[in-house]
Amino acid sequence: MWLRVLLVLALFLPLSTSAQLRHYVASLDQSQWTLSGNTPIICRLEHDIPAYGKAIFTSLAGKSHNLIFNLDMWVKPEKVTQAKLMSLPPTWRPGVLSTEITELTYQKYFSGEVTRNAAWSMLSELEQGMQPTFYYADWYNHDNKIAVGLSAVNFNRQYAEFKACLAGLLPYSFDDIAFTVLTYEFGGQELTHYAKEQIAKVQEYLSYDPDVELVLIDAYTDSYGGRSINQKVSEKRADSVKAFFVAAGITQERIHTVGHGELNHVASNDTIGERARNRRVVIRMSKPM
């Protein structure tokens, strides 16, 4: 194993006569993969690297299958560092060639990230029993070289569950619904067909994401009818949306409602279409930074 690592380093990171190599990778007994996130809004696959940190693959709900790999180091880079990501064969597969996956830059004080295409390549290499390995110079002593490997031992079972999780991710993200406008049919509490689809999305997302700490519901009317009546209508609309979320299991403490009546029109009231735009409920959601 050490001979193979030294040969790779000789090709990609030349060693001086006084250089040292530190190689971090889980042994056969240590190698474990864990599906730490398995919900319709996040899939997360983790692997501990002894004495170094953690390897994390993450995909979030959204319109496309996004994927980010994060090399969460216990000790963050002290300077901007260039690294090379290789795919190495395990020691029990002699004769299999190493291949380069990508080159990347570690930013100062941040963990290493690998974005979509290269991250998918890493998963593919692991699935085939290969060992994605990062090579870079120690930022405290540039003569010393570091190799950080991801072991494929015990990977495939958890990867199968990770892929099943990916298939169940919601096709929209928090950003897609964090600001949602619901519109109403004329003269009542009935949401339009499109608004019903939107509120169902918001409710579904909220049921899975406990990190949403506040849901603000602001309700408005057009100018038809008396001002006091419209104020009450707006309050009923806000309360009905809140009740919908509460019935779905969202705690009342996370929801704040305000009825604004005829205030804050977004269009005039001269046409049917403009009045329809004013009959609305605006849902705003926030999460901790």
Image: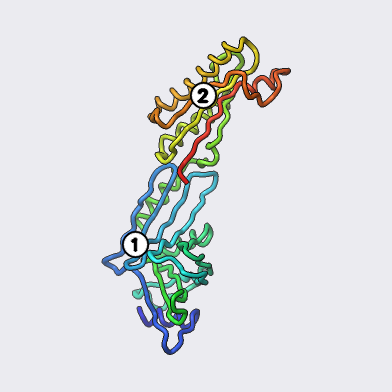
Q: Nearer the viewer, mark 1 or mark 2?
A: 2
Where 118 sits versus 238, above or below?
below
Q: Nearer the viewer, residue 97 or 11?
A: 11
What colouring does the structure picture have? rainbow
**Percent position (x, y) of residue 175?**
54, 41
Q: Residue at x 62, y 18 (%)?
A: 262
Q: Position of residue 93 (x, y in %)?
A: 37, 74
Q: Quadrant of residue 129?
A: bottom left
Residue type at numbered disc 1 = Asp
Q: Which residue is mark 2?
A: 258
Q: Is residue 22 above or below residue 161?
A: below
Residue 66, image x, y percentages = 51, 51
Please name the amino acid that badge 2 sits on.
Answer: Val
Q: Is residue 46 left or right of residue 79?
A: left
In the image, which disc is placed on residue 94?
Answer: none
1 and 2 marks in contact (CB < 8 Å): no
- The disc, 1 or 2, on the residue closer to the chain's N-terminal end is 1
Identify the image quadrant of residue 32.
bottom left
Q: Residue at x 39, y 82 (%)?
A: 20
Cα separation between marks 1 and 2:
47 Å
Label 1 SS = strand
- Picture coordinates of residue 142, whole percent (x, y): 47, 79
User: How many badges with numbers are in the image?
Assistant: 2
Residue at x-position 41% and y-position 34%: 207
- Residue 97 in sight in this render: no
Of residues 167 and 255, which is closer to you in this image? 255
**Along the line of sight, the residue nearer the viewer: 239 or 79:** 79
User: What quarter of the picture does the N terminus occupy?
Assistant: bottom left
Name the residue furthest right. 270
Q: Which residue is mark 1?
A: 48
